[in-house]
Image (tube, rainbow, N blue to C red):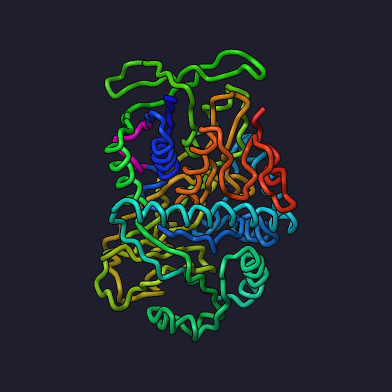
Amino acid sequence: MKVIVLGSGIIGTASAWFLNKAGHEVTVIDRQPGAAQETSFANGCQISVSHATPWANKTAPMTILKSLGKEDAPLLYRFRAEWLQWKWGMNFLRECIPARTVRNIHQIVAIAEYSRQTLQAVRSEVDIDYNCLTRGILHFYTNQKDFDESLASAAVMRDLGCPRTPMTADEAVKLEPALAHIRPQIVGADFTESDESGDIYKFTTGLARKAQERGVHFQFNTTVTRLITEGSGAAARVTGVEVIDAEGRHQTLHADAFVMALGSFSVALLQPLGIKLMIYPGKGYSATYPLLNADLAPTVSLIDDGYKLVLSRLGDKLRVAGTCEFNGYTRELNATRCAAITRRTRELFPDACDYEQPAYWAGLRPLTPSNVPYIGKTKFSNLFLNTGHGSLGWTMGCGSGRAIADIVSGHQPEVDFAFTGMASHKMSGHASMPACPDRHTA
């Protein structure tokens, strides 16, 4: 078949790679001049199956209340006159019920573990230099209550096969000596040896080049304006996608199947088709610092729980990312929030980096209330979803791409996950997708 993939971030590029391997003729459309120019450009760079606890959990409502009015809070919710934001917020609160949180963890761990294994298979097949480190992820805590509450989630993940092992503060510092400076603040930690880190931008652009070598066509500087459909009911299908190309010309591109992988921007394109995705953009920030003293910088990827930051070593640089701002589709940098990242990183590793030359960035994470992405079919027989991966797009990217290629090809993916619009697959007691009440495919 001829397949058009909309979006060239990690999700779209991985989808194109696996669709091509399945024998399809693939074209990727993106408004940017190259792959991985938006949300996949400069994130926290962790392949973190261990970080699968949904943002929607029993502690989240109080965290949000404590953050109100604090410009530098890890979670900043700016109330706007947007029905989607309010509806998303109400659904998010419903997902904070403990039973739903556990169910969502099952879903996230399933696709994340499958994706990590798929990434490893891709890595063994093609040579892409992306500063890959396979030294695990160390999650450390500076608040005793937060650490105590984390133990239950860690136990659930161990039951699901994710080896998230609790540690004492001394064990954490022994594993990552760069934390010695803040040893008095650490109350506990947990470590997942099987997790990884690596530069998502380098991997995605590298995979895009490999895909081009195999015949995938990337059409950049091309803006999607609408999807064109025909028929109704079971006969409804997409016939083409209208775009504005690099020369400013309107064109309609045709294919046998279409994959929506535009992250937060999937919502507006699908709404006229009656597909109402419950996705809201969560603006995440990152800062990249040149290293001055590599021996004082971490080599194990870290999660600083109290400040909601992730830290990854990328060769001669340190990437620090996190926080979340619910404030529409703007990517404008908030200087106060940028300064908070630098202030905390300097506290952790005062002499490791050049803090006078940070490279700040912001990207829009496509968040569902449950943190469970939309992967699967829609009511249109040839339109498929691969979007809504939130802060775990890098973690879930390769597995999501492989799964959607299977679905487009008419096969059942080899993972225990409740795919959108599909019958259950070994669902271990959670056969339907209850996590997000507005997962419309009808």
Residue 127 in percent (x, y) is at: 29, 53
- Residue toward you, 305 or 313: 313
229 versus 168 height, above or below = above
Residue 392 in percent (x, y) is at: 50, 52
- Residue toward you, 128 or 356: 128
Image quarter where the C terminus lies is top right
Q: Which residues are magenta?
A: 28-37
Image quarter where the N terminus lies is top left
Q: Is residue 36 left or right of residue 157?
A: left
Q: Quadrant of residue 147?
A: bottom right
Residue 102 in percent (x, y) is at: 69, 58
- Helix, strand or loop for the magenta stretch, by majority: loop
275 versus 401 height, above or below = above
- Residue toward you, 361 or 241: 241
356 versus 21 height, above or below = below
304 versus 367 height, above or below = below
Q: Residue at x 41, y 78 (%)?
A: 176
Q: Residue at x 64, y 34 (%)?
A: 421
